[in-house]
Image (tube, rainbow, N blue to C red):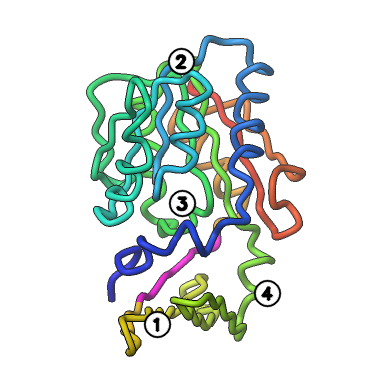
Amino acid sequence: MNCYGPLAAWYDALTDDVPYGSFADLYEAEFARDGGEFRLLLDLCCGTGTLTAELARRGYEMIAADRSEDMLMQAREKAAALSPPPLFLCQSAQELDLYGTVDAAVCSLDGFNYIPGVELDGVFRRLSLFIRPGGLLLFDVKSPESLRALDGSVSVDESEDLLCLWRADFDAEENCLVYGMDLFERAGGLWRRESEEHVEYVHEIAFLRGALEARGFGSFRLIEDGPQSGEGRLFVSAKRL
């Protein structure tokens, strides 16, 4: 089943409460805290590019990567008027391949939760190649407790032209949250149904720290009071040594 295919056209409308400006504020605070020069950034798992555009408007040169062509289509349209425009790459985090190094990489809104734990080492290895020494990696994950608490939950989002229904089940054996999503889109006098399945994996903080250190990242910082902290969102900052 597709993931971030049919949802792409409706993603921004369904997530209009995300405080992207606060995410950018947190990243800039980490840049200032570090004291280094940060001009060229990678937005990994960029989705529809709202954060990419926000950071570009703040003066950063942006590279943005995502594996979903449908999400990237939305991102390119959103960034069309920016100068210079971001460079968009259709790449998964596991296959990241840049032309050079960046000063920092950010990954927002559960991007790393979509990556199984056994694949994170490879992702951190690739990021260690493309973040300059002294650069930063900044990302968020949902806390293990918040993902497990969603087991059995059902949620509905509704507008005049869309009904979105999703159901979540926690798979204890695989240590992940699996949720199926049904999208009912108005098409004239009828409704068209599309379906997606999403899987988010639990990542313990101690595991993340060890995996980062094994790939040359230090100065590990856990930030528990960032945007959406009340929803279980945790932020990690690490320096490429």
Q: Which residue is mark 1?
A: 184
Between discs 3 and 4, the one toward the N terminus: 3
Question: Magenta region: which residues?
Answer: 196-202
- x and y percent of residue 182 in the render? 41, 82
Between discs 4 and 1, the one toward the N terminus: 4
Q: Which mark is residue 111?
A: 3
For the residues labelled 4 and 1, the Cα–Cα distance comes to 26 Å
- x and y percent of residue 183 in the render? 40, 79
Q: Is residue 201 magenta?
A: yes
For the residues labelled 3 and 1, the Cα–Cα distance comes to 25 Å
Please, what is the three-letter code of the amino acid marked with disc 2?
Answer: Arg
Q: Which of the 4 image quarters holds residue 43?
A: top left
Please, what is the three-letter code of the amino acid marked with disc 4?
Answer: Ala
Q: Which mark is residue 39?
A: 2
Please, what is the three-letter code of the amino acid marked with disc 1?
Answer: Phe
Disc 2: CA contacts within 10 A as few (<14), some (14-19) or many (>=20) = few
Apparent side of residue 166 relative to residue 182 in the rendered image (left or right): right
Please, what is the three-letter code of the amino acid marked with disc 3?
Answer: Gly
Of all residues, the one furthest to the front in this rendering is 189
Q: Which residue is mark 4?
A: 149
